[in-house]
Image (cartoon, rainbow, N blue to C red):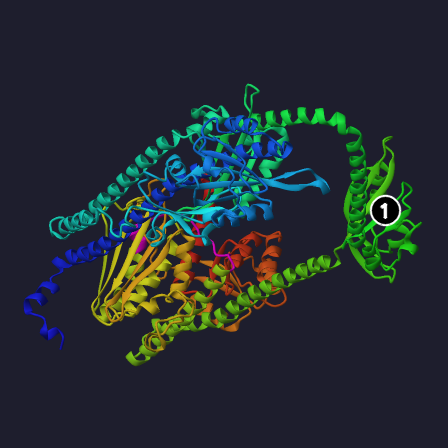
Amino acid sequence: MALKKIPVGWLRFLSNRTYLPALLAFAVVCAAGYFAERQNTTIHHQSERARVQQQAGLIKSRLEGQLNGDYQRLRGLAAMLATEPDMPQTRFSRLAAQVLEGETAIQHIAAAPGLVVSLIYPLKGNEPAVGLDYNKNAAQREAAHRVRDSGEMVLAGPVDLVQGGSGFIYRLPIYTGSGSERQFWGILSAVVPTETLYAATGLHGSSLDLGLTGQDGTGAEGRQFFGTPDTLAGTPVLLNVNLPVGFWQLAARPPGGWQGRPENLWKLRLALLAAGMLIVFPTFLAGRLSAARQTVIGKLRRRETELEAVSRRLEIAVKTSRVGIWECDAGNQRVSWDSRMHELYGIPIEQGPLAGQDWAAMLHPEDRGRVADALQAAEQRKTHFASDFRIVLADGTVKHIRALASPFTDAQKRDWMIGVNWNVSEDVHLREELIRANRTLSERNTELKEGKRALEQAHAELQKQQAELQRLSLVAKHASDSIILTDADRRILWVNDAFTRTTGYTASEAIGQTPSDLLDGPNTDLDVIREMNRHKDLGIRYHNEVLNCTKSGEEVWFDTNIVPVTGADGKVDLIIGIERDITHSKLRERELAEAKLAAEQADRAKSEFLANMSHEIRTPMNGIIGMADLLAEAELAADELQNVETIRSSAQALLKIINDILDLSRLEAGKFSIAKEEFNLRDCISSAADLFHPKALEKGLALQVSYAEGLPEQLYGDDGRLRQILVNLIGNAVKFTPEGKVAVRVSHTAEDPFRLVVEVEDSGIGISASQARHVFDRFTQADAATTKAFGGTGLGLTISSMLAKRMGGSISVESELSQGSCFRLEVQMAPARQAQGQTTALSLEAAPHLAPCRILLAEDNQTNRLLIRKYLRGQPVELAEAGNGRVAVEMCRELRPDIILMDMSMPELDGIAATREIRNLPVPQPVIVALTANAFSSDRQACLNAGMDHFLAKPVKKAVLLHTLATVLEETAAAQQQPRARA
């Protein structure tokens, strides 16, 4: 009814095959345009986020560098106040002026002993702040008390200042005295104006919408204090700004939010429309599709060039700062530096950045291990990295470096570490000068307090040693591992409670004995005990696993560490033994070994079952198919011939199911090999399609095969597996298409002419989107009605998909219910190694006439022997039969046949063993052809290794057998003539 509503003109247009390429090109252009628009949008969003993340990362690095640098300056001044609690205003001003030298955002510094501001620099303009009592100031009381109670630095703000304006305030607690006399003196405050900090770090004047959250260093849970609330909406780029205590969260996005649509959207659409018109136009056909695709690829490459230009501009901006920036790809450990990093390390830019051992070699030997371990731990755990260390330049100059780094994941889901390094040598030298000044002052006071201090230090040291001894005693006593102390003669001096729990021996029972007297059992390895004692005598550490016995006689495994302690004379004074019970671990190792053995046995049982199943099914199948073929050659009535054809088709269907199951098993076990050889592409495709031409003609279907221009004639790969996949895809298309056509299109990808693309499209029943997701699952068909209507096991597409993956490709499907399907096969081939001439396929339709010969058939199955006799009926051959391998060996010795047809599985002596014995007989050696139901590739290799010359798998067709025998006889005759020619 729907076709009657279509105008006659449109029906005529659709039935004209001239327009079919244009219609196909239109569909492809529409799909390509949709994909290109989606890709363009994705690239736009990714590049925009990457740009925002790079700019925000630069601002983050500047904030961390500025704030942490100012904090280090203040620590030195706080140390001076701790040693000079009665410091006058003049000395405070002189020291504070030294702190504010250089590049710093600090504007004012004030000291508040007893939480009352009494020292301030500069004093001019800050007179209102003198005398400020934090206990009475509601705005700053909470932060001041937090510093006093926590004992840690607090960066508060922004807050309103008494002097006017707003700013961030560093507050550092100051304590005087030490030990029990340590007491809170007051706090040291430093004011950083908000505008100064924002301008110095690039927050003002940035091309991004920025927001800072985490007032007073409270992180993402804190209050926003910079930027508009809209900045946090719409998935902004979030970075943590690490502070000396706590962190801020920096949010960034483009001005006005993320751009929803790319700027070049309509340009892209117009370009795709123009390309589509050129493709659809009948005179240009499908060739213009490749040109449009190249146009799109060129635009993407120009986009990459533009991104590289933006990256270079960002690099120039970074070079203007004093902070060196580096980044490292955690996946491949690729490191990149900016120019400032090269200046810091004295490495020429053309030499490239240092990484791994080269970078570690520049670290000061005393810092190398600590810094390398901390950086490696941060990379593995994806945590922040912060460290101060020294580097030694090539000329011997030592620089003090401060490093900060944070992990992040880019738009491509790659893990990176990005960090900054800057030279803090001046800060370190200033701190050292302050320490030296403090030391000089302390030395003057030491002369007056030396006696008292020496007594206090001695008393404190004694208490410390007593506490340390008590802690060590508690640790050793309550440790979960057994601890044994022995003297130089290996006599036990002391054991902990864990030793008693593990071995059953109390301390009184163990002391005075040797560990061997108590713990060695009948199964203890005496070589291990002797080696352990040798290490004890030499004073060398020793570690090994030892099997011991407890007091109850139970065997236990110990992981034993022996640590000899030597005296000043180098002799062993004490031996510490630490033992850990690893009995359960040993049991688990044994269980795992047993489980592995059971799994291997199960795998062997599965392989044996499949081999037996193949043999037991193929043996009767050989008789069924062979006899059916012989019946088909006889002159039969039409209905009888139809019955015979039904038997043949049913037997072939059953054989295909068996082959599919065996192929799937071999693929799952990883024993399915891909053979590579040179072949003709068109011959391979045509041979697969020709199999279904009769069926297509019977159903009234048009089976079309087309080849794109530029396809190579000869390829190097597994043409057998390629043909197997095509037979399955084309067979399915013909089977599931009641009317219409089946089109096979062969082409290659634009990037690689040897990456084949074969599309099999039909106008059949189609499948739904939900069914398409499972069409490649094993034993799966569209629905139960499909199985009943068309038959099959559902393994064909599963095996084809697995084969395609093994050949470096894949299979995909596009389908719509009742509208047909299109399966796309993509496989990787290689160029032919040398030019090949045309090869003529061997025709098996006409059975050849054999030369006179003597043939011995070694077969235990009577039906198969009857079938071979019928196959050879009318041939000038003398056929002898043997029912088992032992008889075959004896008959070979007596009859001396030209050819032996050898079955593998026979009683008395199997085919493999019989072949080996025949090859050792002192008789003219026959040609042995394996004729067996064992169809695995491993069976074929076993036959060839045993000495057989050819391999035929049951069921075997008459034409295949006769052609094989004819080939063997020709090769034998040619081999016999060669010596005569040489003579």
> Is residue 324 part of the magenta span, yes or no?
no
- Return the residue nearer the eye: 44 or 54: 54
x%, y% of residue 79?
61, 33
Query: Could you say which quadrant of the image residue 187 lies in?
Result: top right
Mark 1 lies on a secondary structure that is strand
- Residue at the image point whose x is 21% and y is 49% from the top: 265
Tally the marks: 1
Inspect the magenta stretch and tell me whether residue 679 lies in it: yes
Q: Residue furthest top?
A: 395
**Spot occupied by residue 293 in the image (x, y as percentages of width and height):** 23, 46
Does any portion of residue 293 appear in the rendered image? yes
Q: Position of residue 26 (x, y in %)?
A: 17, 56
- Label 1 amino acid? Leu
Instruction: Please report the residue visible at 30 percent of the width from the left and 69 percent of the height from the top.
Output: 767
Residue drawn where x is 90% and y is 53% of the image: 510
In this rendering, does residue 412 appear at all? no
Q: Quadrant of residue 386?
A: top right
For residue 130, side relative to residue 832 (left or right): right
Q: Residue furthest bottom?
A: 639
Position of residue 112 relative to residue 634, above or below, is: above
Mark 1 highlights which residue?
485
- Tell me residue 497's x, y (percent): 83, 56
Q: Is residue 87 left or right of residue 292?
A: right
What crowding class fits label 1: few (fewer than 14 Cα within 10 Å), some (14-19), or many (20 or more)?
some
Q: Which quadrant: the N terminus?
A: bottom left
Is 524 rendered above or below residue 326? below
As drawn, 797 above or below 738: above
* Left or right relative to 718: residue 174: right
| Residue stretch rendered in magenta on the structure | 669-685
